[in-house]
Image (spheres, helix red, strand yellow):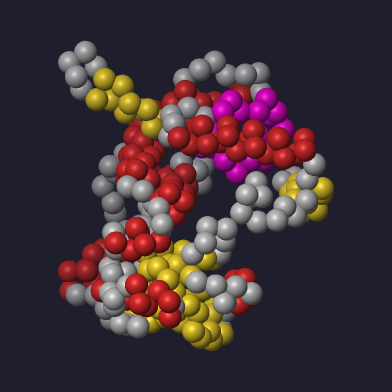
Amino acid sequence: MSSDRRPDPGQGLLLYLRDLVQKVIPADHLNIRGLIQLRNEMAYYLNDQVSKSTTNDGQALYHIGRLPDPINNQQACLKCVQLTNCCIYQKSIEEKNLNSSMASLVPNTLCHLLQEHLDFYVHWCLLLDLESKASTDKGGVCDLWCKTGHQREQEGTCIDGLSLSHHQVNNGYCLLTFSRHQDKHKLSSTNINMIGIAVQDYMIISIEKTNHLALCNGTVVSIAEENIDIAIESESLQRIITLEEEIFRLDRYSSFSTASILYSNLSKLMMDEPLSDNLRKLIIDRKTPEFAAKLSKIEIEKVKGIFKSLNKPQKTAVLKVIEIIY
């Protein structure tokens, strides 16, 4: 898949989802063709994440895009962790005739949910999709491929022409120190801390030549005029060291980074579990919450460390949430 940028390994990893067994298999022409077809199909549906239509009076309407048809295998679907999401999608978004396997599975899976719950799910899925699409339209990952490091540095989203000057391994992570490469220092007089990158920014580390893109990711720990420190997972260090003589670039990754957390929270809210049911009553059904008369010492101890950095209104809000009886 990346033979245009690096040597073809001739092999690939095959993961059996049912047994969670991974095997190395030869990547012959048929396997590669199948992977490319699946990649193109996935890209097609991801690109159609949100569809837009216009009413007769000119009002814009947005809809969640369609997904590939589900498999017709009830036994496999029963074990799937995405069963609830898939069933809601088929019933409330696509609203099409169900195949034989899903005809009984969908109503049985969603029998604990009211129509108001399904509408809430669809509404917030659409909002999250719109936010994710807006983040993607700003550039994001595609700019790593389509723009040079110098162009992105002019936009304040990249630091170009860096050399690895030092690395230090700590508990579970590694600290990389980058500074301007000697040749690049003559071309760019801008101090590293004046480009627009800040501490805690999430960065993608690449070689300036595009044959090694996104070697690993890391977080900015500190930044000065002449150097920048990036914390990465220690497992990625060997990959960087083998290319330490190359010229690096650091690209800020400002995608919709909380999307996976928000989608997961929305999915868990629809689960057939006591906690999810109580949360649905509070959040969707707008049930008036009941509060405990007093908190136990154990509950207070749990939040004591959090309180140190909060002001009084924030502390009051946290205590109110803890006092709710679920």
Q: Residue at image x 45%, y 67%?
A: 249
Is residue 145 visible in the rendered image? The answer is yes
The quarter of the picture where residue 252 lies is bottom left
The quarter of the picture where residue 242 lies is bottom right
The quarter of the picture where residue 120 lies is top left
Q: Residue at image x 57%, y 61%?
A: 212
Is residue 111 visible in the rendered image? The answer is no
Q: In the rendered view, would you say 38 is above or below 211? A: above
Left or right: 85, with 63 as reference point: right
Q: Quadrant of the C terminus?
A: bottom left
- Viewer-proximal residue among 179 and 189: 189
Q: In the rendered view, would you say 286 is above or below 149? A: above
Left or right: 309, with 136 as reference point: left
Left or right: 113, with 35 as reference point: left
Query: Residue 43 lies in magenta, yes or no?
Result: no
Q: In the rendered view, would you say 19 is above or below 244? A: above
- Viewer-proximal residue among 292 and 323: 323
Left or right: 17, with 208 as reference point: right
Q: Give the range drawn in magenta.
A: 68-86
> In the rendering, at what x and y percent does residue 295 appear?
32, 71
Q: Residue at image x 46%, y 51%?
A: 145
Number of residue marks:
0
> In the rendering, at what x and y percent does residue 76 appear?
70, 35
Q: In the rendered view, would you say 156 is above or below 31? A: below
Query: Residue 79 lies in magenta, yes or no?
Result: yes
Q: Residue at image x 29%, y 61%?
A: 154
